[in-house]
Amino acid sequence: MWSGPCLRQNSCEGWVYEMTRGLVDLRSDTVTAPSSAMRQAMAEAEVGDDVYGEDPTVNRLEEAVAARLGKEAGLFVPSGTMANQVAILAHTDRGDELFLHRESHAYYYEGAAATLWAGVMVTLLEGAEGLFTPEELKSRVRPQDIHHPRPRLVLLENTHNRAGGAALSPERLDPVMALSHELDLKVHVDGARLFNAAVALGVPARRLVRDADSVSVCLSKGLGAPVGSVLVGPREFIERARRFRKWLGGGMRQAGILAAAGLVALENIDRLAEDHRRARDLWEGLVALGYQAWMPTVPTNMVMVDTVEPNHRMVAALKAEGVLVGALTPSRLRLVTHLDVSDEDIARALEAFETIRGSYGG
Ligand code: TLP
C-alpha cells in the first residue's frame, strides 16, 4: 500500500501510479499512460454489446484500421498476443505447419500458445533482422506427403522486436510473401509496431502489408492506448477469427470504452518519428560514453546495448539512478522510447549510464 498522492501526471498529461514516479521508464513502449484527451474520449464513448456486434465505437475502430491497412475487415482484441493466436487459429488446422523466425515474438514470448491452442507444428527459420530469405523458406517447406505436417502459414514480424526494432522494407518482404503464396502458404504479419516501420521507412503501412493475408497491429505500444490490438484481413477470415476470439475469452461487451482510446491512439502515428529521433539521440550518447551498441544504427524506437554478462546488477544500478531498462539477454539491454519519454528523460538516462560506467562494463 502506498501513502501520499498515488498518481503523477506524465509528459503526455496521463496519470500513472506512484510505483514508477520520477523514473525514466525505458523498459518498453507498453508502459505509457493514457493522455487526458484519451481518457475523455473513453469516458464519452458510445457503447453497445460487442459480442452482438453492436458497439458502434468498436465497429468504427475496426473499420478505420482495416481501411488504413487496405483490408476488408477488422477485429478488436485485448492484446497483441491474442491477435497473433486468433490469426494462427483462423488460418490453420491441427497438425498444420507454421513457419516463423526463431526470434519472433509469437515463438519467443507467447509461451507455447500456437502449439497449445492451434495444435500446429512450429518450424523455426533463421535470417538477418528477424527475416528469413525466400531460399531459406523454400529449403524448409517439404512436399505434400502423409509423413509430413501440412505446410500452411508463414508468420512475419515488422518491426522486429528482438532484432532491435528492425523495420523491414517491401524490397525484403515482397519476395518472401510472393514465394509463400506460390507454395500455397498464407502469410500473417505481426505488426505490433507496423506503424513504426512505416514511419521509419517513409512507406505507407498498407504497402508493407499489401500481400499479407492478415495483419495485427497494437494500439497499446507506441500509439499510447491502454489496451488493444486489431486484426485485419478478408471478411470471411475475420468472421472465423471472431469465433476463436470468443473461444479464447476475448469477446468483450461494452468494449467501445477501450476502442475509443484506440481511435485517439491512431492520431499518434506520425509522432512516432519523435520516438525514433530520441532513440537515435540515446544511442549516440551511449556510444559517446563508450557503450557497445549492438546494431550499427537505430532503425526505430529501440536501442540495444551489449553488456558484460550477467547484466542484472547493471539493471539494478540504473534503477537506483532512476532509470528502468529491460534485459533482452544476460548480455544485452533493451531501451525503448515512447510517448512518455522526453528529451530531458534521455539526458537523465545518459547521466545514469555515465554514473555507473566502469562498474558494470558497458
Ligand atoms: N512485446 C512486449 C513483450 O511481450 C516482449 C514488449 O515489451 O515489447 N508482437 C510483438 C512484436 C510484440 O513486441 C508484442 C509485445 C506482442 C506481439 C504482444 O503484445 P501484447 O503484450 O499486447 O500481448
Image (cartoon, helix red, strand yellow):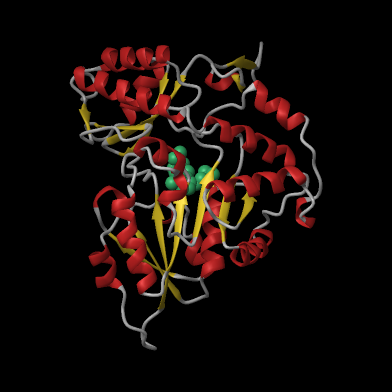
Front in this rendered view, residue 111 or 271: 271
Residue 37 appears in which quarter of the rendering?
top right
Identify which residue is drawn at 53% across, 33% down: 223
Q: Is residue 246 above or below residue 167?
A: below
Q: How many marks?
A: 0
Residue 247 place in picture, x, y as percent: 67, 63
Residue 335 place in picture, x, y as percent: 36, 29
Residue 328 place in picture, x, y as percent: 34, 39
Q: Residue furthest bottom?
A: 146
Residue 45 place in picture, x, y as percent: 76, 35
Identify which residue is drawn at 26% across, 58% down: 126
Q: Is residue 193 visible?
A: no
Q: Is residue 258 above or below residue 154?
A: above
User: Quarter of the image containing the N terminus?
Assistant: top right
Q: Is residue 355 visible?
A: yes
Front in this rendered view, residue 298 or 267: 267
Q: Residue furthest left?
A: 290
Residue 101 appears in which quarter of the rendering?
bottom left
Identify which residue is drawn at 52% across, 46% down: 217
